[in-house]
Image (spheres, rainbow, N blue to C red):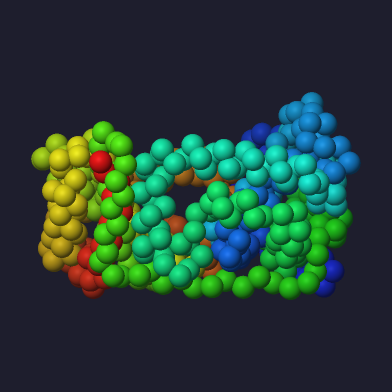
Amino acid sequence: MAATIKHLEINKVKIPVVFEKDTNLPIMNLQLVFKNSGYIQDNEKSGTASISAKLLNEGTKKLGATKFAQKLENSAISLHTSTGFETFVIELSSIKDVHTKALSLLKDLLKDPNYDEKTIEKIKTIQTGSLRRKENDFDYIASKNLKKLIFKDTPLEKPSSGTIESISKLNLNDVKKFLDSTLDLNNLIIVVGGDFNYDEIISEIKPILEVLNNKKENTLKEITIKSENKTKTLLKETEQAYVYFGSPFYVNVKDKNAYMAKVASFILGGSGFGSRLMEEIRVKRGLAYSAYGYVSMNKSHSYFTGYLQTKLESADEAKNLVSSIIDTFLKEGVTKEELVAAKNFLLGSEPLRTETLSQRLNRAFTLFYRGLKQEQTKIDLEKIENLKLEDLNNYIKSHKEIKNLSFSIVRK
């Protein structure tokens, strides 16, 4: 059974429900997805969403982290909160036999988060320790500095986990304020599946959600990437160079030709061995162990990005080669052989993307969230199968903005 989109009304708010019945295993998988509520809402307090998610993983105020975790573990229940850029997600999963207990624990958490000063200080200490360790993670540093370049003056400029300075300034009231505006019925999309009928599981979920706020909906801000061709180089004691790059790639997730961006991205750098970047940088010249690049398409923004590691003395050559490869790709497009290989992989690997209930629910949610039809994947696969070389190359040539590359390099 494929996922379906239904709606549920709670406190006069119409809430979308992505649902799939799956009788293969006696399980329940529930995600409360709060849209426009990830670290895009951090504003000047970088790391707030991350710390808030971690607080919800610390159990209830009444039981505390240890006793709450024991209740979950005793019944093999998984309850975890995470944050992305645009979404804040509480995920609950269990076997069917204990789903009532699982839902009860979720309700306890929503009613009584562990708002405790000691808990916040513990989370901040752990987060700060993690950030200090990342000071010697040169991949992290290069990636972080690239985002500062290409997403300057936008929420994406700041790291999702915050900085040591920003985390030190966060307090319990900041977390309360964030969760108060996030855990709101107006932001909610329910994603649920398992060995249940729709009416059966919704009747159990509805009373839990009535504890959520009903104040206002968070808004999504569109983000435009900078195209300034800048390079930021950071000198560190390292044995190799870390080269990260990015550029604009203007494509809306609802664009009828967005499937071509997926094919072009796969050929350019997303397919590993056989991709243009890997072939030119590693196979032909041996400049890097691996080299990747891909088009990232999101509701709020889209861009092209990639990375490689190379010998210190090869950093400049690798940087120039990336620019040269992108220029050639833009001017000449792809070959017939590359298109055939891309079609074979994208079409042939499709069953692997829908093997599990979780995969199918995540896809159904993504399509709904982006405002696309539930059959959009099938439509796009048919378009890919019939895609002509000339049409793809004309599409690639129309995206001249991709050559406006910025680089973030960490080297000795």
Looking at the picture, tell me which residue is in the foreground, 393 or 412.
Answer: 412
The residue located at (64%, 35%) in the rendering is 24
Residue 146 visible in this rendered orientation of the protein: yes
Q: How many discs appear?
A: 0
Please identify the quadrant where the C terminus is shown: top left
Vertical position of residue 405 compared to residue 31: above or below? below
Looking at this view, name the residue that lies furthest to the top: 74
Residue pictured at 46% horizontal, 62% vertical: 157
Task: Pinpoint residue 356: horizontal percent, then vertical percent.
Answer: 55, 40
Left or right of 374 in this view: 109: right
323 vs 119, nearest the viewer: 119
Q: Is residue 254 visible?
A: no
Residue at figure coordinates x 85%, y 58% from the top left: 211
Residue 81's x, y, as percent? Answer: 67, 46
Tell me if 160 is positioned left or right of 347 in this view: right
| x, y percent for residue 374 | 54, 61
Question: Residue 274: x, y in percent?
Answer: 21, 43
Q: Which corner quadrant of the image does residue 87 belong to?
A: bottom right
In front of the other: 250 or 45 = 45
Is 122 in front, or is 83?
Answer: 122
Q: Residue at x 41, y 65 (%)?
A: 151
Residue 167 vertical placement versus 45 (above, below) = above
Figure check: 213 above or below 240? below
